[in-house]
Image: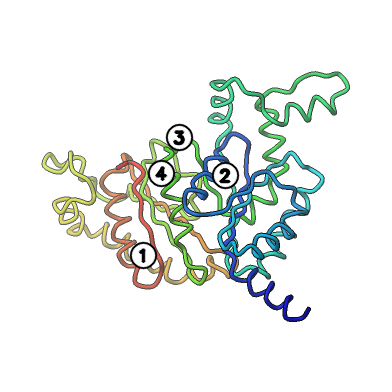
């Protein structure tokens, strides 16, 4: 019996587990398909109280990569999800919790286009004596409120306007992440399109000279040699990068505490093609010396 228990504990410790939760309509099913295509055994919409038992059964079947999707419809058991995640992290070496989200505008548009009812509209009808159907916006707000505590302990991915190919890339970044390492994501963006919702830190590169106003550089990007040479001659650009690096080298270890494996640093400029791209590339080049680092340019896609 003791030997069997020890073998079970060893198998549980070696599992690679993703728990996928988030807002209805934000893309949880797509995330699960991406994980399935990457070799994970996927289970959709399982009650929280069965998660631990399911992992034990699957580990006994020699499954090592498992993804489980949980939604907010099971309100009574949902309150146990955060304690369950904390408990599982003690038993499983590599457990990642993903919270898939999107803006209300995006979700309302998606439900309007597909003409599907929000899952919470059925629950609200059951509890509504006047039998008045809530609006899609009210359903989204209710679900967002119910999932607030789970969002705090999860890696958040906002899919508003995100292409399926970009979502696939982000999920595969997380799959490849070693359990012993932290992943730093550096992304450039355009302020005119808004700050990326998944940003943990945001820096502003609009204070440095803009290559856009140089006729020979206007149609290039911050990755082109001519733009790089131009910006490296600018004292403000060099000072900005140096001071951001000083801040990150000092504070990243504190941001990346033991329960946090993913950290997104965004740097923006007006159009997201010159200054922010240059700065993101320079920052990534330095951070790669000490951290597992990935880079993406939102406005060069």
Label number found at residue 166 = 4
x and y percent of residue 184 in the render? Answer: 43, 61
Residue neighbourhood size for the residue with mark 1, other residues' Cα within 10 Å, grouped as few (<14), some (14–19), many (≥20):
few
Asked whether, in this view, residue 249 is left or right of residue 14, the answer is left
The residue sitting at 59% across, 34% down in the picture is 25
Is 186 left or right of 277, judged from the image as shown?
right
Q: CA distance from mark 1 to mark 4?
A: 30 Å
| Residue 48 in the image, given as x and y percentages of width and height | 74, 51
Q: Give the mark count.
A: 4
Q: Residue at x 29, y 62 (%)?
A: 239
On residue 161, which mark appears? 3
Looking at the rendered structure, the secondary structure element under dot 3 is: loop
Of residues 212 and 48, the one nearer the viewer is 48
Disc 3 residue crowd, few under 14, some 14–19, many 20+, Cα 10 Å: few
Secondary structure beneath label 1: helix
Question: Spatial distance from mark 1 to mark 3, Cα to Cα?
Answer: 32 Å
Residue linked to disc 2: 100
Kindly check if marks 1 and 4 are in contact, taking CB atoms under 8 A apart as contact: no
- Residue appearing at x 88%, y 22% in the figure: 129
Q: Nearer the viewer, mark 3 or mark 4?
A: 4
Q: In the rendered view, does 98 fall on the left or right side of 140? A: left
Who comes first in sequence, dot 3 or dot 2? 2
Gap in Å between the C-alphas at discs 3 and 2?
13 Å
Alpha carbon of mark 3 to alpha carbon of mark 4: how far?
10 Å
Where is mark 1, residue-wise? 243
Q: Earlier in the sequence, mark 3 or mark 4?
A: 3
């Amino acid at each position: 019996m003791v030997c069997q228990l020890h073998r079970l504990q060893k198998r549980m410790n070696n599992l690679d587990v993703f728990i996928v939760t988030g807002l209805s309509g934000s893309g949880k099913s797509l995330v699960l398909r991406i994980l399935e295509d990457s070799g994970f055994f996927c289970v959709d919409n399982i009650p929280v109280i069965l998660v631990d038992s399911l992992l034990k059964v699957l580990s006994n079947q020699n499954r090592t990569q498992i993804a489980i999707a949980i939604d907010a419809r099971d309100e009574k058991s949902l309150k146990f999800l955060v304690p369950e995640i904390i408990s599982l992290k003690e038993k499983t070496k590599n457990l990642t919790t993903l919270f898939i989200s999107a803006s209300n505008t995006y979700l309302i548009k998606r439900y309007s286009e597909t003409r599907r009812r929000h899952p919470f509209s059925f629950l609200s009808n059951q509890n509504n004596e006047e039998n008045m159907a809530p609006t899609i916006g009210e359903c989204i707000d209710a679900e967002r409120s119910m999932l607030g505590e789970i969002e705090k302990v999860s890696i958040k991915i906002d899919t508003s306007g995100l292409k399926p190919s970009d979502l696939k890339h982000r999920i595969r970044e997380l799959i490849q992440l070693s359990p012993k390492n932290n992943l730093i994501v550096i992304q450039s963006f355009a302020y005119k399109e808004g700050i990326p919702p998944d940003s943990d830190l945001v820096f502003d590169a609009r204070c440095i000279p803009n290559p856009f106003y140089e006729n020979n550089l206007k149609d290039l990007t911050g990755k082109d040699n001519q733009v790089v040479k131009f910006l490296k001659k600018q004292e403000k650009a060099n000072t900005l990068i140096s001071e951001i690096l000083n801040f990150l080298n000092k504070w990243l270890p504190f941001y990346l505490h033991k329960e946090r494996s993913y950290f997104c640093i965004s740097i923006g400029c007006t159009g997201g093609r010159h200054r922010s791209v240059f700065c993101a590339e320079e920052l990534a080049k330095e951070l790669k010396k000490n951290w597992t680092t990935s880079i993406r340019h939102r406005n060069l896609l």
